[in-house]
Image (cartoon, rainbow, N blue to C red):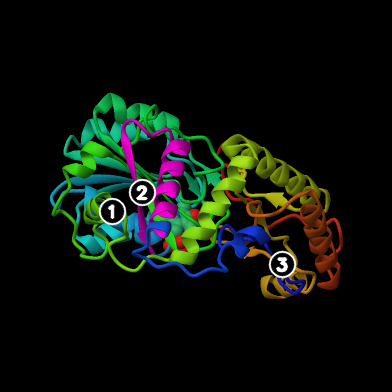
């Protein structure tokens, strides 16, 4: 990495290893067997990490993660079928917006900014509205950093005979999930989150039988996941121009993920990053939005201190001048900022970002420990 690149404490794109970047120093022909082998190995590895080898298939899709979510919803959900969307932040709301755009009917359980959707909430609505055929949930709601309880939601779906679709964009690769055991009909993620690749494609891990039954259902030509799958099965190629360099970098990233101990190894490092970050920032007076039990090892929301001297853009610039990019908050209820734990970040970088934040506070004229946040949002402890 060149010295000038700041560390990205953001939930993707994130800081990648030098070897992942170096994997992009070649040009591949999109029709060529060598490139097709890269794609095949990526899909095979992803399926293995998800525990879906016997039941599911992996289909990549060009574009950012949202393209893959839209492709999955548009391909798998029949036009007149009703969906239940669980919302507790920006990404759950985005799923609703996609279904609105596609003209697919849906109901929502909206828990606001950060309260988790619980199994009992879902069971109640499913009992009440038998027309619902599938439930969509966000695994780690990256807008607050909450890790949603997908196991209890999957249990309720299984008992009620409903399909479950998971946006595991920011969790897959670092939070264990087994699509066959859970079970879930589809899980969607992308290259630039916990596997630590560069941005350029997403992928869906879908029950083979469900995907096979979805021919002709998609609203879009280019986002048709069934057509992409069929073409890839037949030719080994992507249907339209693939992000060749991104795929090569992703295979390298997957090898490094495996070498780190797979999901367990990555989870251990991200948890350690989070614990170190939260302890360090609490020591200088910052408070987390969520109680410890709901903190994901992906990204943490901190409440802004209640001081006229705390201005996010100045805070951001002062931290950036010290070599780190953080993320603004995304809450409607309270001023906040977010710090990510994913990417090539280790003890040294976490300690350095805590120091950078402490220095930035002093530069802004805040006393350290910093003042408490303004009125804490309700139910923090029980969120
Ligand atoms: C990153 C992310 C997405 C996809 O966002 P893009 O900007 O389209 O890559 C979707 N859902 C969640 C939970 C995410 O964290």
Q: Secondary structure at mark 1?
A: helix
The correct choice, above or below, for 97 with respect to 85 in the image is below
Q: CA distance from mark 1 to mark 3?
A: 35 Å
Residue 232 shows which numbered tag? 1
Q: Position of residue 382 (x, y in %)?
A: 57, 36
Horizontal side of 299 relative to 30 (left or right) equals: right
Horizontal side of 311 relative to 178 (left or right) equals: right
Q: Position of residue 276 (x, y in %)?
A: 77, 45
| Mark toward the viewer: 1 or 2 | 1
Q: Going by the picture, which residue comes out furthest to the front?
A: 33
Location of mark 2 (residue): 204
- At x 19%, y 46%, the residue is 82
Magenta span: 35-62
Q: The C terminus is located in which quarter?
A: top right
Q: CA distance from mark 2 to mark 3?
A: 31 Å
The correct choice, above or below, for 367 with respect to 4 in the image is above
Horizontal side of 181 relative to 27 (left or right) equals: left
Say if residue 192 shows up in the picture: no
Location of mark 3 (residue): 1
Q: Return the residue nearer the eye: 180 or 244.
A: 244
- At x 45%, y 46%, the residue is 168
Q: Is 274 part of what is drawn in magenta?
A: no
Q: Secondary structure at mark 3?
A: loop
Residue 68 occupies quadrant: bottom left
Q: Return the residue nearer the eye: 349 or 299.
A: 349
Give whichever of discs 1 and 3 has the lower sequence position: 3
Q: Is 60 part of what is drawn in magenta?
A: yes
Residue 125 occupies quadrant: top left
């Amino acid at each position: 990495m060149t010295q000038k690149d700041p560390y990205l404490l953001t939930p993707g794109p994130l800081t990648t290893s030098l070897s992942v970047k170096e994997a992009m120093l070649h040009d591949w022909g999109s029709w060529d067997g060598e490139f097709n082998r890269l794609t095949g190995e990526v899909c095979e590895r992803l399926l293995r990490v998800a525990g879906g080898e016997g039941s599911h298939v992996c289909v990549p899709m060009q574009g950012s993660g949202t393209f893959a979510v839209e492709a999955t919803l548009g391909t798998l959900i029949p036009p007149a079928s009703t969906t239940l969307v669980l919302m507790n932040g920006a990404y759950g709301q985005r799923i609703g917006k996609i279904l609105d755009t596609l003209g697919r009917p849906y109901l929502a359980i909206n828990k606001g900014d950060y309260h988790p959707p619980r199994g009992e909430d879902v069971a109640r609505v499913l009992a009440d509205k038998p027309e619902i055929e599938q439930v969509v949930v966000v695994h780690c709601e990256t807008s607050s950093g909450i890790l949603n309880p997908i196991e209890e939601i999957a249990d309720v779906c299984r008992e009620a005979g409903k399909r479950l679709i998971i946006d595991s964009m920011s969790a897959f690769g670092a939070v264990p999930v087994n699509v066959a055991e859970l079970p879930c009909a589809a899980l969607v993620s992308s290259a630039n989150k916990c596997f630590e690749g560069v941005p350029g494609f997403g992928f869906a891990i879908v029950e083979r039988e469900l995907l096979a039954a979805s021919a002709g259902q998609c609203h879009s030509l280019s986002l048709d996941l069934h057509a992409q799958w069929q073409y890839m099965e037949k030719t080994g190629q992507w249907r339209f121009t693939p992000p060749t360099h991104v795929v090569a970098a992703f295979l390298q990233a997957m090898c490094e993920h495996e070498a780190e101990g797979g999901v367990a190894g990555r989870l251990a490092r991200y948890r350690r990053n989070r614990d170190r970050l939260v302890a360090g920032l609490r020591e200088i007076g910052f408070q987390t939005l969520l109680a410890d039990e709901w903190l994901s090892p992906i990204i943490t929301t901190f409440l802004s201190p209640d001081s006229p001297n705390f201005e996010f853009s100045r805070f951001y610039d002062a931290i950036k001048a010290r070599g780190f990019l953080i993320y603004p908050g995304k809450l409607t209820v309270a001023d906040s900022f977010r710090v990510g734990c994913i990417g090539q970040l280790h003890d040294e970088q976490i300690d350095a970002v805590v120091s950078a934040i402490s220095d930035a506070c002093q530069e802004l004229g805040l006393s350290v420990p910093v003042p408490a946040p303004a009125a804490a949002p309700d139910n923090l402890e029980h969120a």
